[in-house]
Amino acid sequence: MGIVFDIKRGGVKDGPGIRTSVFLKGCPLRCIWCHNPESQAPEIQWAVTTDEVCGREMSVEEVMAEVLRDAVFYRTSGGGVTFTGGEPMFQFEFLKALCAAARAAGVHVAVDTSGQAPWEQFAELVPLVDLFLYDLKCMDSERHARFTGVSNDLILENLRRLDAAGAKFWIRCPLVPGLNDSDSDLAAIRAFADTLHHMEKLEICPYHPLGLEKCTKFGLAPRYAEKAQPTTADLTRWRSALAK
Amino acid sequence: MSYAEQMARLTARKIEQTRAKQDRLGARDEDDYGLVLPPESFTADLPVRDATGQFSGPRAWAANFRWLMEHHPLYIDPDDALAGRWMFMLSRMRLGYQLSRSGKDAHFAPDYQIGLDLGWGGLLEKVRAARLKFRAGGVLAAEDAAYAIELMDAEEQAILGVQAWIRRLGEAAADRTMTEEDPVRRANLAEMARICLKLVDQPPETLREVVQWIAIFNMASRTYNRDGAGGQLDELLRPYYERDLAAGRITDADAEFYCFCLLLNDPHYYQIGGPAADGTDQTSRMSFIILEAANKLKSSCNLTIRVWDGMDRALYRRGVEILLANRLGFPRFSGDKALVEGFMKNGYSAELARRRIAVGCNWMSLPGLEYTLNDVVKINIAKVFEVAFAESNSWEELEANYRKHFAAAVKVTAEGIDFHLDHQYLNEPELMLNLLSHGPIEKGKDVSHGGAMYYNMAIDGAGLAVVADSFGALEQRVMDEKALAFDEVKAAVAANFEGEEGARVRALLDSAGRYGAGGTRADAWAVKLTEILNGEIAGHTTPHGFKLIPGWFTWADTIRFGKSVGATPNGRKAGEPISHGANPLPGFRKDGALTAMATAIASVQPGYGNTAPWQLEVDIGLADDEGAVDKLMALMDGHFALGGTLVNINVVDADKILAAHKDPSKYPDLVVRVTGFTAYFNSLSPTFRELVVKRLIREAV
Ligand code: SF4
């Protein structure tokens, strides 16, 4: 059993093709811009302004029943399931069982991770996962710690080892204007990416302020109150800086 | 002068005409058709009417139709490859016209090939020869022979009317050459005149002639009684195109322009691609030319691409690209596999099933072979549910009561179909479509009365999601969770959810698992309701023995039907519209997942060869996504693999819709797919616009 806080079907953003995203609760990071702040705590949470609940206990079978509803669309689109969060590695045993079940059902498996988990766990997942969606938030370790609560040492180390193990991955950069998107930030990410061998794609996940509303809903104190979305100029600059 | 400039001018004029129609006629919740307004000075003094303004029977229809064609105002556009536009619907000049209901318009498709082979002169000879045969006697019983002779007389009058109109069009085009100064247009007018004068009698031989012939038939048939079914357009045109091309008479650009003009002339429903009767792919160069012509049209168009395993995927892909780029609601995509397999379940061969093509807003037809009353006969199951619910004192009684009342509804509906088939030939014979059907002239019988080869009478259920959600909400809240008592729901529904107590009950019902979410009680009910629909209709006949085929489709009737139904236990208030076709209600899932919608709609396909379309509105965001074409194709491929039959997609710019909703005149060219058809947004009634807007906003959030 594990705690799932949402299952979204028909997604087209988290990995290739048409996908179902399974959101697992709990995260070791505390990104100040977090878009899912209600997902950070591992336990079930109740909203304060509505009667919404974040999180419910589900078995692997229950999750898979939902996932398999769209099996035909995974086939026609080259899609599959994406386990995300929170940080899906936070419920490692549950995640491993889910990956194994999806693999057994012939469903393409992606894991969307911050990279903050013991290497041994990644090593166990490699044979069960088709694609890692791996976040790179900031190459500067000290600022990384300031933005997310943890240094990036383990995260970068895990990514190098995943690469060496031959795992397939996409790097995803959550970029927040003025925080982690300076030209040197972007150049550092690009330079690091260039040292890797199995990266298939380098993507940008632009900041959006939806987390703010969720903070209010779940009675959490927002730590980054920017309401504006990145501009088209931001996006263009990011894209060209990260392009090869 | 280039075709591009000509097309631009033609399109601009079409937009002007749409605006003029909107000003004079007001809002209309239906197809745009190709109709233009007659001059204000024109009055139709139909020669045959009784004191109430009514007329009926072959003789009266023929006399009035002939008069109308002989006096029809002439429309000649020197930029157009084709002469003529239509302006009236004779059927609407009668008293008390209504589109759907027994005794009204019959939806079925002509076989143009009959006319293309014979020409109007040949059709006239055929009718006269048949009349001689019936006069000579011995073929039919005396009473039938009398009708057959009257029918042939009427057909003759109708043809003479059409011929007079074509001749006048040709003469008018010739006259215009005298005053036209531009040499290109003058040459165009001269060719238009030559073609019309030829087509008065002779069959068409070149591509431009064939396109003009089809346009003339379409306009005449529209003028007669609205019609609107086209055919397998690529295959109809291909031989003429290939011959012209081989002879060096035309280029692909010419062919494209002729097709452009045909599609501009009238948005008839045409299918392109798909399997031929023998199972080979029909996609040809002609299919692509038609699709590109439609692409350039940038206006209301009803082209359907038949999607199947053996198809040229390039046509499919190009269709999706055009749909996303133009955002005009076409082409539509029809799912061959389920349609063919389904139709075969009625006892027909695979060859015949492949010839049954998508030529109506939701419907399929065997061109020239079949009479169907497609999209005309509906059972509002929300009403059936309302009656059953009022009669039930417990959850346990409800299903049996629903079944009982649904069976009763089918019974009276089937009797109504028989009534129509018994009388329509006397009321409103199909003088135009008879000519392009196999049988009516040969047998001396109207297509609605024994003339056609096959009778596959359509009955569509309407209001599926409202009823599935009502059953589902009751089962979940009353039986599974015991959160509400059956009587409590009954009282709240009877009081239209008024008051605090009503609001509380409603909130619980409204938030129950919906049809479309996947795995809910309502999902299971939607499937069960389809089984009940099939159980009473599929494989059954009317009392007189005519085959029935079920479908789920509501056309524009969601509002009208909703008005007659009180509150329902899905939280719907009295008088609110019922749900659309097989679609789940908006808000069926928080993520609004298209895969969930596709799966749900595939799960409720009756599966006997008629459709339960998926009506999909996607906002611009999806259309702009990287890989949107692939994703949309994957979505449709999945839907068709699960048994889907037809997909209608509207790509909508939410801002534009909102602006158009505030001031329709700002966007006279905004085309939306409302149900199965495309229509100009500004010609929809405010209530209908409201409905489209609401759905979009909710989906966008
Ligand atoms: S890693 Fe993701 S879920 Fe965790 S805090 Fe950061 S943004 Fe939120």
Image (cartoon, rainbow, N blue to C red):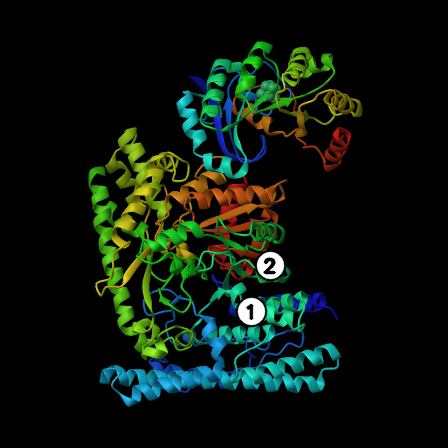
| Vertical order, B327 against A113 (above or below) | below
Left or right of residue A138, residue B466 in this image? left
| Vertical order, B671 against B20 (above or below) | above
Look at the numbered disc 1 and give the secondary structure of its residue. helix
Q: Give the quadrant of the C terminus of chain A.
A: top right
In the rendered structure, which amino acid carries the disc numbered 1?
Answer: Pro
Mark 2 Cα shell of 10 Å, populated few (<14), some (14-19), many (≥20): some
| Vertical order, B251 against B550 (above or below) | below
Q: Chain of mark 2?
A: B
**Residue B194 coordinates in the image, percent (x, y):** 62, 83
Mark with earlier residue (2, 1) = 1
**Residue B246 coordinates in the image, percent (x, y):** 64, 70
Q: Quadrant of residue A87?
A: top right
> Dot 1 corresponds to which residue?
B239
In the rendered structure, which amino acid carries the disc numbered 2?
Answer: Phe
Q: Quadrant of residue A225?
A: top right
**Does the beta carbon at disc 2 come under 8 Å from ligand 1?**
no
Left or right of residue B443, residue A11 in this image? right
Judge whether residue A219 can be spotted in this image.
no
> Dot 2 corresponds to which residue?
B288
Front of the two marks 2 and 1: 1
Judge whether residue B590 can be spotted in this image.
yes
**Residue B586 coordinates in the image, percent (x, y):** 45, 43
